Amino acid sequence: MIISIFDYGSGNIKSVSKAVESAANSLQKNVSVQVIHDPKKIKEADKIILPGQGSFKQCAKHLRGIPGVVDELNDFVLNKKKNIFGICVGMQLFADFGEEDGGSKGLGWIQGEVKKIKITNLELKLPHMGWNEIVLKEINPLFQNLSEDKHFYFVHSYEFIAQDQINVAASTFYQDEITVAVFKDNIFGTQFHPEKSQKNGIQILENFISW
Amino acid sequence: MLKKRIIPCLDVKNGRVVKGINFVNLVDAGNPVEQAKIYSDGGADEICFLDITASNENRDILLDTVQKTAEQCFVPLTVGGGVRSIQDIRNLLMAGADKVSINTAAIKNPDLIKEAALQFGSQCIVVAIDAKHVASNKWGVFTHGGRESAELDVLEFALLAENNGAGEILLTSMDKDGTKSGYDLQLTKSMTNSLKIPVVASGGVGTLEHIKDGIVKGGASAVLAASIFHFGEFSISQVKEYLNSENVPVRI
């Protein structure tokens, strides 16, 4: 199986690829983890991971700056219906629109917008940074076999506001309830970083490999 | 609920830990990768490397250390020490650091924070401030291990850093550092009251109660400690069990 991490110049790809390799090892599965830059390689993959760090606008700009990438991703996800996993801003890009830095268009795969987390309690800081527990919304193959305490590592100031609640796979509480994972058919994304979330994070990557 | 973070800090020089875990059962007591792994397996919420290598030539050794650590520790890794430019930050992030801590360079050139936040995102830009008490309820920013005054007010500088896009402040009290008498709670509280971004308290921790005070009385989002972990006085899990019993939210 080929799992490709699409690198469009957004930060720390290495931890993602190392974490996927670690997950594959513990499953004893023969997985080739590739970091790809060329959109043409997207179709060679069985599964894609779309990472993303920084601002929505910068990530969208970098991604769209690569000729042909949006068409290849649309073909992979919408026509071929192969599995994709978006991490952090990678997940946010699944939305129609992100308001950060004046706003920009997302990939529009899951209806919704990415907006700044509303905080009125001055004791709560932004970014929402650190370990928080998630609440699962429905049974989902990506959340199998997690430990009882579901802590994951977050660092973000914006949240995915899905139009249809059915696409919300998990949430957490930071003043109010915020969406931290989205799910639709073959599309899955988390606001938290599985590659930085110790055992629970590796478990989700194992689930993605087995999905 | 968001948990308070416990962050062990390792001083690294020429790719070796100089102030680190003093455990006898370590195969190689100076190996930062091995120590970071012990901490991350033991429940550390983040790992912090402080590079105290004096010369530039040894930066490659640091990058190699960061890379090897990031390959084995699946918790966030913050790296600081001698970060001077956008290129330094990029190199560390590419090697696998999740956050980069900027100190002197941010004081000399606050625009570096702005530029770095724009390029890499606020989430990975930590501004480290060494503070010293100068007058009643006033603290000054110091550099060079507390020897030189930067002629800046700590709070004013921290607010500037926040405005420029810093994602977090690592606040070290130079008065308290090494004293084991507890964090400077007044300093910490004055910062956490005024800033919207998280503050990591550092300098002075000697007991479990000090850690609780930094969080509860100081309002810190995270606490950094070195010697209490390194010399085996407390393990990360002991700290967390204590905090949990005191109703401080931590990840167990």
Image (cartoon, coloured by chain):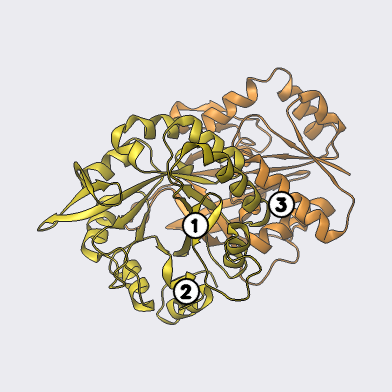
Chain colours: A orange, B yellow
CA distance for labels 3 and 2 = 30 Å
Residue B2 seen in this snapshot: no
Q: Viewer-proximal residue, B62 or B100?
A: B62
Q: In this view, does A211 lie above or below A66?
A: below
* Number of the front mark, 1 or 3: 3
Q: What element carries label 1?
A: strand
Q: In this view, does B140 lie above or below A102?
A: below
Q: Position of residue A31 (x, y in %)?
A: 86, 47
Residue occupying image coordinates x 45% and y 56%: A176
Q: Name the residue under label 1.
A: A130
Label 1 is placed on what type of residue? Gly
Q: Position of residue B216 (x, y in %)?
A: 32, 70
Label 3 is placed on what type of residue? Ala
Label 2 is placed on what type of residue? Phe
Q: Is mark 3 on a helix, strand or loop?
A: helix
Q: Name the residue under label 3.
A: A19
Determine whether, in the image, residue B55 is placed left or right of residue A179: left
Q: Name the residue under label 2.
A: B231
Q: Viewer-proximal residue, B67 or B28?
A: B28
